[in-house]
Amino acid sequence: MPRYRNLEPTSEFWSWRDQAACIGHDDLFYSAEDEPKGQRRRKEEEAQSICDTCPVLKTCRRFAIESEELYGVWGGLTEADRHKMAGRHRTG
Ligand code: SF4
């Protein structure tokens, strides 16, 4: 598990994930670097539709932004969304 600046990876810290709507859908939330863009986009849209139903969306989104999470869909934001918000360019 990666360590994040100012964030402790304790089980209490991660307890919000017990309510995550994405449990069991990891295949939709992460894409391989060499995955075709159309397929990646379709998976991201499906993942975002799951996020839209998630009771912990705000916590998840804040976590992803504060921890500068690079990969996957978190809190309804794609990798490209977060890179754009942070002023970075996605390379993959
Ligand atoms: S907001 Fe999306 S990525 Fe975050 S826990 Fe909920 S379903 Fe998972």
Image: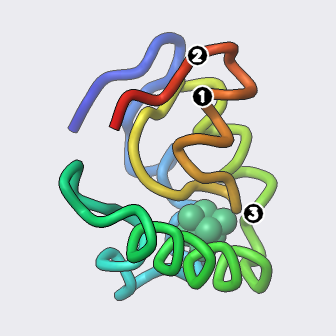
**What secondary structure is found at the residue carrying circle 1?**
helix
Mark 2 CB lies closer than 8 A to ligand 1: no
The residue to which callout 1 is attached is 83
Closer to the N terminus: mark 1 or mark 2? 1
Q: Position of residue 63 (x, y in %)?
A: 62, 38
**Numbered badge on residue 88:** 2
Q: Residue at x 44, y 26 (%)?
A: 8
Image quadrant assignment for residue 2: top left
Closer to the N terminus: mark 3 or mark 2? 3
**Numbered badge on residue 57:** 3
Is label 1 in contact with label 3 (beta carbons under 8 Å)? Answer: no
Amino acid type at image mark 2: Arg
Circle 1 or circle 3, nearest the eye:
1
Q: Position of residue 22 (x, y in %)?
A: 50, 79
**What secondary structure is found at the residue carrying circle 2?**
loop
Seen in the image, is 24 located left or right of residue 78?
left
Q: Residue at x 52, y 44 (%)?
A: 79
Of residues 23 and 38, the one drawn nearer to the viewer in this rendering: 38
Image quadrant assignment for residue 88: top right
Of residues 62 and 28, the one drawn nearer to the viewer in this rendering: 28
Seen in the image, is 26 located left or right of residue 48?
left
Circle 3 or circle 2, nearest the eye:
2
**What secondary structure is found at the residue carrying circle 3?**
helix
| Circle 1 residues within 10 Å: few <14, some 14–19, many ≥20 | some
Amino acid type at image mark 1: His
